[in-house]
Every structure is written in structure tokens, then in C-alpha cells.
Image (cartoon, grey):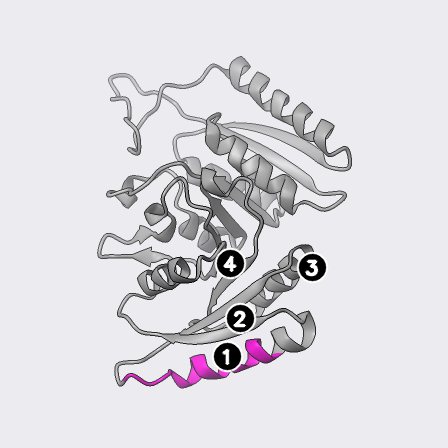
Amino acid sequence: MIPVDLTINTEVAVKKALELSDEGTIIHLLHVQTYVLPGARMSGRGRMGYRKIRDNKKAASRLYEWKGAIEECAGDIKVCIWILKGNRIQKCIEKKAKELSIDLIIIGKNSYHSWFPFLNTVVPGKLACQTGIAVLTIKPGAIYNKIKTMLVPVSNGSIKHKMEIISTLCRKFRIRIHLVTFMDDQHKPINFYASSLLDIYQWIRTFTHTPVEYVVLHGDNKAKAILDYAEKINADILLVHPETETRIGWMNRHISDLIPPASKMQVLAVQ
């Protein structure tokens, strides 16, 4: 599913969807139109509020243009169009994604440094948590970039879904994987994390035959430590747990808010 806002974000998400799609994939283009209440103040860039509702025919026309372009580019891919109305954009996306049993939601994001994350209309980490669906967030800089280096934190209870994603991506791309775990207050690897790290490390080497290495990170904020290390190794994609590995700072900004628009780095949140 691609939430469509009729900006460059749509182009970014569509191109990435085509890159990840297999034969028989169904791409759902979803556009949510927001209402305007009498006397409501219009929202500015990066702010939530009541936006001027876009003309229904214009939105439909743009969506059908995308549908035609996608199906012409990849004849073995089907495209479905959905136009919903409501002021809670994320709730609309959540409801439709569950209804359609979506496998992946792709969000194009051109913004940089959102200082008021609680005003965002769509928060990728929360979207992944609420739906249980993997959410890929990408910036314009990643539009033509192939995935070559993946950073995978091992810091939560389940690694099953991360292993499924790794297996899928390894079949499509030649990837080098960097696993990271974390120190506790006594500067020792947390036992549970260490055990999970060993399990996934051995599984990657045995079943995917993909180059893999690991490192132990320090820092009070996991998401900040992950982002700093990702920049150090020039990672193309971060495979993270929503919320626990994506929230940075006291305002709980999503990790993607700190990635510049020109960055090739993608964030894939999986529950």
C-alpha cells in the first residue's frame, strides 16, 4: 500500500514499490481527503490541522495516471485505487491496510527535522505498531538507490519477523548485513540480546549465505545510537522495531525525521 499525497512523496514511494515488487504483486494507491470545518485554520508545512480538501475529480485523475504508468511499466503488477474521506489520516490508512491484509506500507517522506512529532498526520512507527504491518519510510535521495548494506538492531523480544524480512531482501539483493546489540548500565552485553544476536548471526551465515558482522553499541537512546552507527557504515536500510528502536529524544521524534531528504537511507519498521 502507498498512501498518496499527490506530491514528490508519491513518486518516491511508487518507484520503490516497483523495485520491491514481484510478479503478481498488487499495489494499492490510497488517497485520504481531509474535511474543512467552518472557521478552521489551514495547516502550514509540517503541521497538522484541517487542510483544504482537494477536488475529488482531480485526485482521482492523478491516481488513475499513476495506475496507468505503473501497469504500463510492469504489466504483471495490478494496481487498485482507493479514495477515502476523513480528518484522521493515519486511522484511515490503518483501517484500510488491515481490511486489505496488506504486506507492506511504503511512505515517501520529503520532510526534514520535524520538531513537533505529535502534530504529524502519519507516524511510521505508530502505524507499524497499530497494524502489525511492516512500514518502509524513504526519502527522495533513496529513489534510485539499491539496497546493499542493511543495519539490523537486536534489542527486543522477537527476531522472527526481522528474519523473515532479511530472507526476503536477500533473495532480491546482494546485501551485507550489520547486526548491532547494546550494553546495559554495567557496560556488559545484555544476556537476552546476546543470545538473540548469536541466533540470528548463525542463521544468516547458514541459510542466507550473506556477509554478516556484528558490533556492540553504547548510549542511552537506542535509536540515536542506531542512526549514528548507520551513518558511520553508510547503511542503505535500517531494519528496526517500531517505537523501541525508532524514537529519538524527549519529544520522541521518529528516526526518519532526522534523515535529510537527499539521504539514501531507508527505514523499515517491523513489529
Question: Which element is circle 4 on?
Answer: loop
| Spatial CA span between label 1 and label 2 | 7 Å
Q: 268 or 43, which is in the foreground?
A: 268
The residue positioned 42% from the left and 72% from the top of the image is 155
**Is residue 243 among the parts visible in the rendering?**
no
Marks 2 and 3: CB-CB under 8 Å? Answer: no
* Picture disc at residue 196: 1
- Residue 128 pos. (x, y %): 47, 52
**Residue depicted at x 56% and y 20%:** 62
Q: Amino acid at mark 1?
A: Ser
Label located before the other in sequence (2 or 3): 2
Residue under label 2 = 159
| Percent of width and height locating residue 82 | 58, 29
Amino acid at circle 3: Arg
The span from disc 3 to disc 1 (Cα, nearest Å) is 23 Å
Task: Read off the magenta span.
Answer: 187-202
